[in-house]
Image (tube, rainbow, N blue to C red):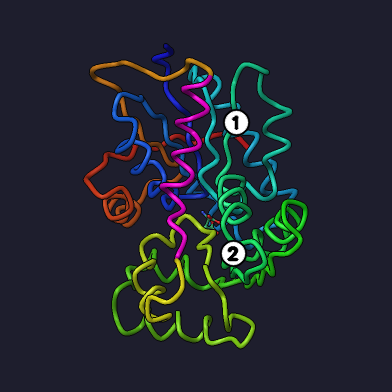
Amino acid sequence: MDNRPIGIFDSGIGGLTIAKELHRVLPNESMLYFGDTAHLPYGDKSPETIVGYSLAITEFLLKHNCKAILIACNSASSTSFDAVVAHVPKNVPVFNVIDPLIDYISQRFHAEKVGVIGTRATIGSHVFLNRTREADPSIILVEKSTGLLASMIEEGFHNNEISQAVIQAYLEDSRFEGIKALVPACTHYPLISNEIADYFKNQVEVVDAPSIIVQQVKKALEANDQLSDAENPALHFMVSDLTPSFQKSAAIFFGEKVKLEERRLSY
Ligand code: DGL
């Protein structure tokens, strides 16, 4: 049993979609969420820059006594996971939001075609392509960078005509013809999963990333005997730049009202 908080970080507030699922599945866990809103978006930054931010935030989470680190950002997971693992003490598990999805695809889509969409940083790292090829070379993986979607969602455009038109413009791509599943590899995309499924007339599985990711975290914490039994777990949500607009969107991503606190880190 370990009642210390799980440290979760993202470039902004999109990672709250993962935090929301974590809180639903593991309601006794305390969480310390850090959204690097001063530096978002990560998706357009170089790997070196994202690694620098990720290490500074990891250090902050360790100082706050976190028992585990969950990198709840695909752009940071694809560029910084190894650096974060190397940075933390051996007894602090580090989770990313990509490995569970690669395991999921590899186990279910043998000899099938699967699409992946995400930011430029995630798609440019080719982590999905390379790792899926290693796990099962029979899977045909089609990657596409869909840079506008995260900011579109953050601006409040989802489940309306504008978001449908943008989604269609990205997915109307002959390379996606015949896919069995689409992996929404960006923390913001759970908010448009239904629209993506509708675009494919519900003939393509839109992978439920938050659920798959959180189940792996749960399993690992269970195996390490690190789950919490706190009756009143503490939930803290911090951002590096607090604006009314982030405060408002946070509630949409977390599914309930959250109080954001500002913490400026020196990096
Ligand atoms: N959180 C980022 C991700 O999952 C999307 C937003 C950004 O580019 O910072 O890739």
Picture residue at 45% right of the left edge, 65% below the top: 206
211 w.r.t. 159: above or below: above
Q: Residue 264, relative to residue 257: is it above or below?
A: above
Q: Which numbered dot is residue 192? A: none
Residue 37 drawn at (x, y percent): 47, 49
- What residue sits right under mark 2 in the picture? 119
The residue under the point 46% across, 53% down is 209
Q: Is mark 2 within 8 Å of ligand 1?
A: yes
Q: Residue at x 57, y 68 (%)?
A: 117
Q: Answer with mark 1 or mark 2, whichever residue precedes in sequence.
A: 1
Which quarter of the rendered picture does the N terminus lie within? top left
Start-end of magenta stretch: 206-223
* Picture layout, residue 111 above or below residue 66: below
**Identity of the amino acid at label 2?**
Thr
Q: State the residue at coordinates (54%, 59%).
A: 185
User: Which x, y percent locates residue 258?
Assistant: 26, 41
Could you tell me if the residues under marks 1 and 2 are in contact, i.e. CB atoms within 8 Å? Answer: no
Q: Is residue 42 magenta-colored?
A: no
Of circles 1 and 2, the one toward us is 1
Q: Which quadrant of the figure has residue 191? A: bottom left
Q: Is residue 48 left or right of residue 2?
A: right
Residue type of the residue flagged with mark 1? Val
Separation (CA) of disc 1 from disc 2: 22 Å
Front in this rendered view, residue 160 or 264: 160
- Would residue 119 be found to the left or right of residue 20 on screen? right
Label 1, on which residue? 94
